[in-house]
Amino acid sequence: MHSRTSPPRRPPRRPPGRLPRLARRALAAVAALFLAAGGLTTPAHAAGAADPSGLLLRYTFDETGGTVVHDASGHGNDGSYERTPAFGQGVEGGSFAMAGGPSSSTTAPYVKIPNGVLKGRGGVTVATYVKWSASTTVNQWLYGLGPDSTRYLFASPYNGGKILYSAITTGGWQAESKLSGGSALPGGAWKHVAVTVDGGSGTAVMYLDGIEVARATDVPVEPSDLYDATRDYTGYIGKSLYSADPYFAGEVDDFRIYDHALSATEVLQVSGNTAAVAGATLPELKVPAIVDGANGRIVLPVKEGTDLTRLAPAFTLVPGAGISPASGTVRDLSEPVTYTVTGSDGARRTWTAEARVMRSPVLPGLYADPNIVVFGDTFYMYPTTDGFAGWSGTQFHAFSSKDLVHWTDHGVVLDLGPDVTWADNSAWAPTIAERNGTYYFYFSGGMATGNTAKHLGVAVSDSPAGPFRDALGKPLVAAGTYGGQMIDSDVFVDDDGQAYLYWGNGGSYQVPLNDDMVSFDPAKVKTYRPSGYNEGSFVFKRGGIYYFMWSENDTRDENYQVAYATGASPLGPWTKRGVILQKDPSLGIKGTGHNSVVRVPGTDDWYIAYHRFAIPGGDGTHRETTVDRMEFDENGLIKKVVPTLESVVPVSVANAGPDAKGSEGAPIRLAGSAGGAAKWSYEPGEGVDSGATCSFADPGAAETAFTCSDDGAYTVTLTSGRSRDSARVTIANAAPEAGDVVTPAGPVEAGTRVTLSVPVGDRGANDELTCTVDWKDGTTRPGAVADGTCTARHTYAKPGVHEPAVAVADDDGATASATGRPVVVYDRDAGFVTGGGWIDSPPRAYRANPALTGMATFEFVARYAKNAAGKDHATPTGSTTFSFQSGPMEFTSTAYDWLVVSGGEVRYRGIGTIGGAGRYGFEVVARDGDTRDGDGVDRFAVRIWDERTGDVVYQNGAGDAARGSVVVHAK
């Protein structure tokens, strides 16, 4: 239910010493009397700054019965004891004692906190003393704030990963922003646990006895997100918001909630750990000081070039505390030195401080046997967690980096015991490979007691950052199957996709893996044990040569070193080439071995990761990991690796991202990534038309857009530093585009040349366009395209109303079509028309009331009349009336625009009024059924529209029969 990740276990701290509340009050009273009498100064334990401001709630648990938990903050946030409470002796005064129990318990007591405490809060601090029973039952919640199991802030002394753990989320356990304390909360003693959440900075921090033990950044949740007005509680003390979780077993005292994230100094103050150091500052620091509260040690990681003999750190203390030597004193910190902190209450504690040049990309803490790989544009490191007697660690961590220098700890990805049934100890020397989106994590392990022989197993995950789960439920290679120990696995995947497994200590084994990556044919196992071989097999390929590497001597020996052989296949035969990495005592570098290598994608730059004795004072169980350059000579042989303290400079990995598709002229997203400065370039593929050009929206951004003027296949290449990577972009042809066809605005006389134009274009700017016009009189002819316009000309021989259609095509065969307003062609000698009668007005013809039907009468005459010179006027004359009595609607024409007589069909258009008012356009289509092309039925249709709005007022069908007469007269 909760996160199973955790950093390495740490030894428990001793709780800070504190006086009972009554004793402190008594001493303060005595001190006051002495002061009033002009006597001794106030005792140190009675002095100190006021508590931090912003207290929202404080439960001191000094009740001895009842159901009310009194809020001492003054805000009235009294809680309630649920079920029968028990009380104990707290850090000061009483405590709330909880017996715990399974989720089904009906007697396990807990506290309900009233609703509204988190309302509107952008930050919060939850701090309390706790004495945990050290139960082995996981997922007990010390407290949980929030409405349900999807939105909460909680702390647990012992989560599923068996560590002190806190998290905040609004998306259930899968979306938790995690704070992993590194080990379980020490039980049986009072400890102070505080969690701060700062919504403004997106930061959450967990403190143990006032010392930071975990930090989460990019936290997307604010405490106010956990408020739910429909609930009657803010949360619980001693009860989980997951119904299946057990109740908390232990005691709590002085439970506080503040309305903001307290500073580290304020948390230290509230914790009562008066002789602690919260942090240290120094101008020469490369990274923040590392404060190990459990061991009283401060490490100052300094930049290259720092004079370690003249450093003056300043320490962050509880208000009222002092340190000797004083903060700012110049000291030689090239070796550990001691400082003594004296709290305001007289408590004393000795701390050690030292400075270290941190040029090496050392993983945080002690790690060995690193397996380095690269997935995409990210390097990953999977080491053995070191620092345990007999290498008895149980947890594997995963680290990632974009540049081989700065590494991120993804926490515990596999924990022997809870995650693996057949091993609970000896988590050694892992390796990893990917296939089809699944990551296969090979590792060694054994049992802590009984038969402690080591086995080789495999776990799987859908992420290189884990967590991983045991794939088989049993070892892949069980102890005793072959000679030597079944440890130190390595996986190599060849160019053809075949994977090979290597392992062994004392003996060396090699075998092709089956396609499932979790099995192999025992009959195919081969052995290769060159002289000097001890363990740590590693295989890679470069330029057609296979390299088999191993470590010689014992890892506890400062002469531990790396040798290699070459071969023509992943299984040899091998030719030993010699030692390429060994100690350099002048730099304090010893025990260099158990390596792996990685190539920066898109380059021929290779790097070797290996462990060495920790500097200073390391040994075979206290090792640290570093990275150095590895180079080859002209024959492909590995040059001697120079071990350094400086390690390497940051590298950059270019990843062009997946292949992409799109259309010409349109931006296509390129999802590249780069660890450093990026630069894009492109090359057109075969078949791309000459003249095609492309551009990047931002050629210096790894994620950008790519636009080309023509279709085809292109190769885009992203360069970052020395790394190059390419992707294929397939660009489809885009259809051309055509606008509205422009034809003569007014009618034209038959025999007159008509010019048509239409704007045309193509997103593929490199495409050539052609156009063709169907003039709708039986004639189709090509037009000419120039400067984005298709132009065509045509002469209509006969009258009619024509709607020419334009087809536009590009040179890749894609087309587009367009039409425009009709071309009205008239012939003044074609005759005239008269008519009168009525039609049956159909439903929906009269738009003001579509349901109306009934008789509609018409009367019209339209002709081209002679002028004084004996020539026909350019516009027709006549009159038209149309009356729909049911409307009522009375339309009368006032002018004609054009008249077309073609055989027995007549079309004419003009303007008029309705009821003698307004300006209405109209168009009549009438047919004389008695002409040669008629069917014996006269027909009449009219469309009338408001010239101002364009709204249709009346329109019947063109095929509606007319009673009366429609007559086309020859001229």
Image (cartoon, rainbow, N blue to C red):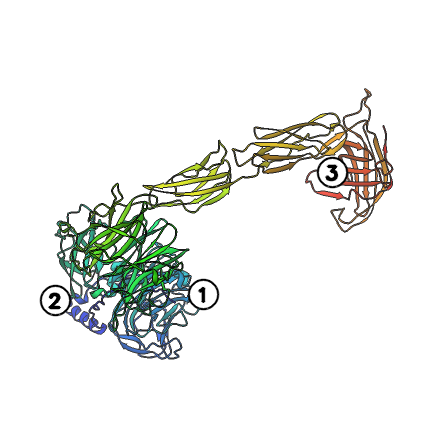
Cα separation, mark 2 vs mark 3, equals 109 Å
Look at 22% across and 64% down and name the residue there: 391
The image position of residue 247, as x and y in percent, is 36, 74
The image position of residue 791, as x and y in percent, is 63, 28
Q: Is residue 641 at least partly visible in the picture?
A: yes
The image quadrant that residue 931 belongs to is top right
* Image position of 942 with respect to 2: above or below: above
Cα separation, mark 1 vs mark 2, equals 54 Å
The image quadrant that residue 263 belongs to is bottom left
Give the amino acid type for the residue marked by disc 3 in the picture.
Tyr
Q: Which residue is mark 3?
A: 920
The image quadrant that residue 559 belongs to is bottom left
* Image position of 897 with respect to 941: above or below: above
Could you tell me which secondary element the residue under label 3 belongs to? strand
Cα separation, mark 1 vs mark 3, equals 63 Å
| Viewer-side residue, 279 vs 710 | 710
Could you tell me which secondary element the residue under label 2 belongs to? loop
* Image position of 846 with respect to 741: above or below: below
Point out the tag, 1 or 3, that comes first from the N-terminus: 1
Give the amino acid type for the residue marked by disc 1 in the picture.
Ala
Q: Is residue 288 at least partly visible in the picture?
A: no
Point out the tag, 2 or 3, that comes first from the N-terminus: 2
Q: Quadrant of the C terminus?
A: top right
Mark 2 in CB contact with mark 3 (< 8 angstroms): no
| Viewer-side residue, 787 vs 735 | 735
Few, some or many residues within 10 Å of mark 3 (<14, 14–19, 20+): many
Q: Which mark is residue 229?
A: 1
Few, some or many residues within 10 Å of mark 1 (<14, 14–19, 20+): few
The image position of residue 735, as x and y in percent, is 57, 39
Q: Which residue is mark 2?
A: 40
